[in-house]
Amino acid sequence: MSPLDPRLSRRQLFRAGAGGALGLYGLGALGGCTVERPIDKPESTAPIKPEIDGDILLYNWAQYMDPAIKQGFSDKYGVEVNEINFDNLEAMVTKLRAGGQYDIIWPSTEYAYRLHQEGLLHRFDRASLSNADGISSFYDGGWWDPENEYTVPYAYYTTGIAWRNDIVSGMTGSWNDLTNPDGAGKMFILDDFQEAIGEANLINGWDLNTADPNELDVSKQTLLDQKEFARGISTNSTQNLVNGTAVIHQAWNGDIVNVRNQVDNPEDFSYETCKEGVPVGSDLMCIPITARSPGTALKFMDWVIQPDNAAQNVMWNGYPQPVDGGKQAFASLVKDEPSIDVNLEALGDGGMEYRLDNPDDRALWNQVWTEVKAS
Amino acid sequence: MTGVPPTAVGTGRRFGRRSRTREDAFDRPRFLKLYSGLVYLYLFIPIAVVVLFSFNSVKSLQSFQGFSTQWYSDFLNDPTLRESLFVSLRIAVITMVIATIIGTALAIGLVRARTRWSPAANILMLIPLVTPEIVAGVSALLIFSQLGIQLSFWTIVIAHITFSISYVTVVVRGRLASMGDEVEQAAMDLGATRFQAVRLVLLPELWPAIVAAGLLTFALSFDDFVLSFFTTGEDAQPLPVRIWSAIRFGVSPTINAIGTLMMVVSLTAVVAAVLLPRFFGRKESGIKVLTGQEGG
Amino acid sequence: MSDRAFWSRFLLPGGLWLLLLFAVPICLVLALSFGYTDDLGRAVYSNTLANYTDAFDPLYIPVLLRSIGYALATAVLCLLLGYPIAYYIARYGGRRKHLLIALLVIPFFVNYLVRTYAWVALLADEGLLNSALKDVGLIDTGIQFVNTPYAVIGGLVYGYLVFMILPIYASLERMDGALIEAGKDLFGKPSRVFLHVTLPQTKQGILAGCVLVFLPAVGDFVSAQLLGGPDTYMVGNLIQDQFFAASNWPFGSALTVVMMLFLSIWMLGYLRSAAREARDPVAAGGV
C-alpha cells in the first residue's frame, strides 16, 4: 500500500489494537500497582489545636451551609473560607485519596470510620473547642469515634417517607407504604445504595446492614417490585416533591422542611418514619491530613457549632444540628409536625445506622444496587 | 463544523438563485417555512423559559409571578458562584488560545504534508470528535491519577485542550483544503522563506477560520460539563460542575440566572467573531467559515 | 530542508499532544479494565478478565442496547428536524442566511445542564406545558412527560441537534447550483430533483451529522439522569455510577472499553468514508 494511501486497512488496525490489548493484559500480570499514588502522612500524630493558620477550603454537599456563616467567620478572623461541593460520598473519598487538599470534609459516620481506619484524618481534642459542651451526648464516644478525636457532628437526619396527603391516603407508617396504590407511577426511591437496599432489608425483617447474599437477593427482588411502582430513582427529593412529580418519595426529614418552605400549600405535605426501622444518618465534620490549614479548620468547626450560628444554619438548610441552639431551632421549625423531629437521646440504641465495615460487603451491596438500576 | 473536505467546487451560480422558468414548489416553500419556524420555536422555548424565569420574583420554576433581579444579585453576591464564573472564563480563554495554535498547526500539517504518518495523524485527530465525553473524562482522570498529578485548574485546562484540538483542526482544514498555495509560491519566488510565506501569507488568509475555530473552542469549553466533572480538583470548580452539584440536591432559580449569563457571555464572543473580521475589512465573516463555506 | 520535512513539522505539536494525552490515557483505561479493587476500595492493575465477564453479563446487554436505541432515535429525529431547516436556510435564506444560522446556534450557548433542566420545568406534571394544556381545557390532570424514555430522547435531540444541522448546512452550501438547474431540466418534479440530485450530493454532510450525533449520544448520561425514569438507565449512567458511586473503576473501565469497541465499528465506517472523500483530487489538495 502506498504511503500516501489514507486508508488504514482494517486488518492493520485490528492487529495493532489486538497487539496493544494483549500487551497491556500481559503487563498487568506484573502489576499490582494501585491507580492512585499513596498520600504522604505527617510525622507526628499530636492533636492539632484550634488556631488561625491560613485560609480554608470546605468540601461539602451542595447547599448545606449558610454562606452567612462562612462570611461571619471570614470577617471575624480575616481568612478566606472557600467551598466546593461533591454530590456523592464515594466521589469525595476518591478525590481525597487522589491527594485533594481539603481542610474540612463532611463524611457520614460510616465514612468517617473508614477514613480513620486508613489514617486519613487529623486528630484533635474535642474538648479544645469552646462550644464542645453543647454537643448532644449521642455523639459522645460513638462507635465511629470512641475518643471524640476525629469528628464533630454537623447534622443528622432520619430517612422516611414523604407524601402528599391530599392525594394519597391509607399510609400505615410502614416502609410498605412506598407501594401504596395511590402513588403508583409517581413514587421515588432515593438514589443511594444504602438507603434503597436498607429499606428493602427493613421491609423483609432483616438487619439493616445484612450482607447475607440470600437475604440481599430477597431485598433485591423487593426493590425490583418497587421499581414497577416507581417513577424514578433520585436524590432530588425536594424538587421532585415541589414539582408535583412525586406524590410519594423516600426522603430525609430535612427535605420535607425545605419543601414546605417552598410551596404554597405546605399543609399538603407529610412525613412519616416507619415502624420497621428508622435509619438515622449523621454528617460529621472531619479534617483530612492533607489539609493546608488544620488549625483554622478546627476553629471553624467551633464556629459552626456555636449556638447562634447553629440556629441560623438550621433555619437556612432545614436540617437538625445536634448542638445547643441547633436543636431548639429545629424544634421550632417543625413544631407542627413532630414526626419530622428526631430525638436522639431517646433513640439511643434503637436508632439504626448504616454500617458496612467489610469492603466485600460493600462490594456486594454495590453489585446488588447496580443490578437493580440496570434491570 | 464538518469532518469532510469540500466536494465539488462550484463553478458559478450558488444555491440560492431562483429559477426564472419553473415557478413550482421550489420557489414557494410554504410548508418548509412553517416547518422551519416550528424547529426554531422548539429550539427557543426552553431558552425563553430560562431567561424568563431568571427574572422571576419567586422561587418557583412553575409560575412566573413578577419581575425581579434577585437571582442575579444572589449570584453576584455569592463569592463561590462568582469565582466559578471566572474560573470557567479563564479555562475557556486559555483553552481557546492553546488549542487554536496546536489545532491550526495540525490542520496545516495534515493538508500540506505528505508523509506516511499522515493517515495515522488524521485518524488520531478524528477520534476525539466521536468519542463520548465520558470516555474522555474517565481516561483523563486515570492518567492524572496515574502520574500522581493532582487534579486542579490546570488538569481541567489540559483535558479541555485535548478535546478541542480536533474541532479546531477540522474547521481550519475545511478552509485550508480549498485554498491553493499560489500566493505563497509567488511570495517565495519573490524571495520569502517558506516560514515567512506561512507567517505573512498563509496565516492571514486563514485568519477567519482560525478565529471561528477559536470561538467555537471557547464556547465548547465554557459550556463543558462532563470533562470538567471528571478532572476538577480542589481549586474552584467551573460553573457547570457547580450547577450539577446544586441540581442534584435541589435547584434554585439562580441557575437560570447563571444560564442566561453564560449564554450572554458566549453570545458576545460569537458576535465578536462575526463582526471582527468585517471590522478588519475582510470580506468573509467568521460564520461562513465555521459552517464550512469557504469565502472568495 | 525538503518541503515534506517542513510541512511535517506542523504535525508534531498536535500529534504528540493527542498521542500522549488522548491515546495513552485511553490505553490506561484499557489496562485498568483488567484490574480489580482492593480492600480499601482502591483500583489495582492486574490481569483478570473478571470485569469483562461481568460486563457481558446478560443483565447489562439491555442497557447497552437501550443506549444504542436511544442514540439511533436521536440521530434519526435530528435528521428529520435538521435537514429541512438546513435546506430552508441554505436555499431560501438569502442575505439573512448567516443570521438564521447564528440564531440556530444560540440555544447551544446556554449550558447543557441548564437547558435540560428547563425542559424538566417545562414538562413537569405541574409544569408550564401541562398548565397550559389544562388552561385550554384539553386535559384534566397532567400528562406525564418527564421520567419517560421520550423525555430522555427529547433531551438528547435537543442537546445534539446543532451537530446535525451544521454539517448538512455546510454540504448544502457547497453544492453547485448548476446541478439543481440541470436536475430541474432532467427530472421535473421538485421531489425527484431532491431525491436524485440534492440528497446524494449532501450524503457526506448527512453522514458527518449522524456520526457527530449518534456516537456521543450513546455515552450521554445527563439526559437520562435529569429527564429519565427507572427504566431509562443508559450505559453512560452505568459507567458514571461505577466511577463515582460504586468506586469500581476497573469494572467501569471494562464497560467503557466495551462501549468504545462497539462505537469504533461505526467510527471506522465513517473514517473510511471520510478518507475516501479526502482522496478526491480536485478539492482536497492533501491527505
Image (cartoon, rainbow, N blue to C red):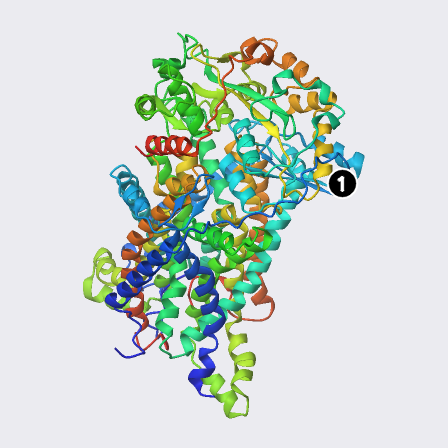
Residue A97 against residue A152 in the figure, above or below = below
Task: Give the letter of the chain under mark 1.
Answer: A
Q: Quadrant of residue C27?
A: bottom left
Residue C69 visible (yes or no): no
Q: Quadrant of residue C153?
A: top left
Viewer-side residue, B190 vs A179: A179
Q: Dot 1 corresponds to which residue? A: A79
Seen at 57% across and 18% down, the residue is A257
Residue B63 visible (yes or no): yes
Quadrant (top left, top right, bottom left, bottom right) of the C terminus of chain A: top left
Residue A68 against residue B36 in the figure, above or below = above
Viewer-side residue, C43 vs B136: C43
Residue C129 against residue B244 in the figure, above or below = above
Seen at 41% across and 24% down, the residue is A196
Viewer-side residue, C287 vs C37: C37
Q: Could you tell me residue A107's position as x and y percent?
A: 56, 31
Residue type at numbered disc 1: Val
Looking at the rendered structure, the number of numbered marks drawn on it comes to: 1
User: Which element carries disc 1, helix, strand or loop?
Assistant: loop
Q: Could you tell me residue C48's position as x and y percent?
A: 32, 48
Q: Quadrant of residue A170?
A: top left
Viewer-side residue, B10 vs A353: A353
